Image (cartoon, helix red, strand yellow):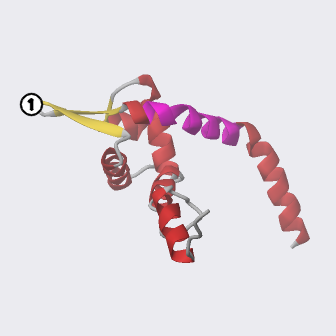
Amino acid sequence: MATTTAGQRREQAKRDYDAFLAVCPTRELLSTLTDKWAALVIAALAGGPQRHSELARRIAGVSQKMLTQTLRTLERDGLVTRTVTASVPARVDYALTPIGHDLLPLMVAIKTWAETHMDRVFQARAQFDARS
C-alpha cells in the first residue's frame, strides 16, 4: 500500500470536490445555491419559461438589479437558459436547464420546509431572545 503526503491528499480531495476544503470550487456553487434569490428564482421557474418581468412580479422584494444578477449567475452555472426571441421589443425568456430541473426538487423542498416550519422558528427565536 502506497503512502501519500498531506499535499497529495489535499490535491486528491480537490479533485474529489470536498466542500469542507477551503480551496474546493463547490463552495462557490454552494454560495450561489444558498442565496435566497437563487432559490426563489429556481422555484419560480418550476412552471416553465418566464420573462424577467414575470419573475419580478412573482418574487416580491427582488430588485431588477438583483434579479438580473441572479439570473446571470444561474445561467453561468448552467442552471438556467436565456432565450432571446427576435421581435419588437425583443422577448427574453428564462428556463431551467436539465441540471436546473435536477436541482428543482431540492430547492422546492427547502422552500416548503421553511414555509412549514416558520412558526417553530419564530417560537425558537422568541425563546432565545427571552434568555438573552
The number of numbered badges drawn on the structure is 1
Which residue ends up furthest to the front in the rendered image?
Answer: 1
| Vertical relation: 120 (above or below) 47 | below
Magenta stretch: residue 107 in it?
Answer: yes
Q: What residue is shown at x 39% (from left), y 30% (from top)? A: 98
Residue that appears at 79% across and 44% down: 119
* Residue 22 makes an appearance in the image: no
Instruction: Find residue 131 and report its horizontal and vertical position in percent.
Output: 90, 69
Q: Does any portion of residue 82 appear in the rendered image?
A: yes
Tell which residue pokes out farthest to the bottom in this image. Answer: 6
Identified by mark 1, the residue type is: Val
* Residue 94 image point, x, y percent: 31, 34
Residue 5: image location, x then y, percent: 55, 75
Q: Quadrant of the C terminus?
A: bottom right
> In the displayed structure, does residue 16 sit left or right of residue 77?
right
What residue would you read off at disc 1?
88
- Specify start and end residues of the magenta stretch as a single range: 100-115
- Residue at (81%, 46%) from the top-left corner? 120
Give the class, few, some or many, for how many residues have Cα within 10 Å of label 1's Cα (few <14, many ≥20).
Answer: few
In this picture, is 26 found above or below 116?
A: below
Residue furthest out toward the right: 131
Q: Is residue 29 magenta?
A: no
Residue at x-position 45% and y-position 30%: 101
Q: Position of residue 36 (x, y in %)?
A: 52, 50
Q: Is residue 83 above or below residue 23?
A: above
Task: Please state if 120 lies on the left or on the right of 30 as rendered.
Answer: right
Above or below: residue 104 compared with residue 47: below
Work out whether residue 62 or residue 48 is closer to the camera in this orientation and state it. 48
The kind of secondary structure element at disc 1 is loop
Judged by its main secondary structure, the magenta piece is helix
Left or right of 20 on screen, residue 87: left
The N terminus lies in which quarter of the figure? bottom right
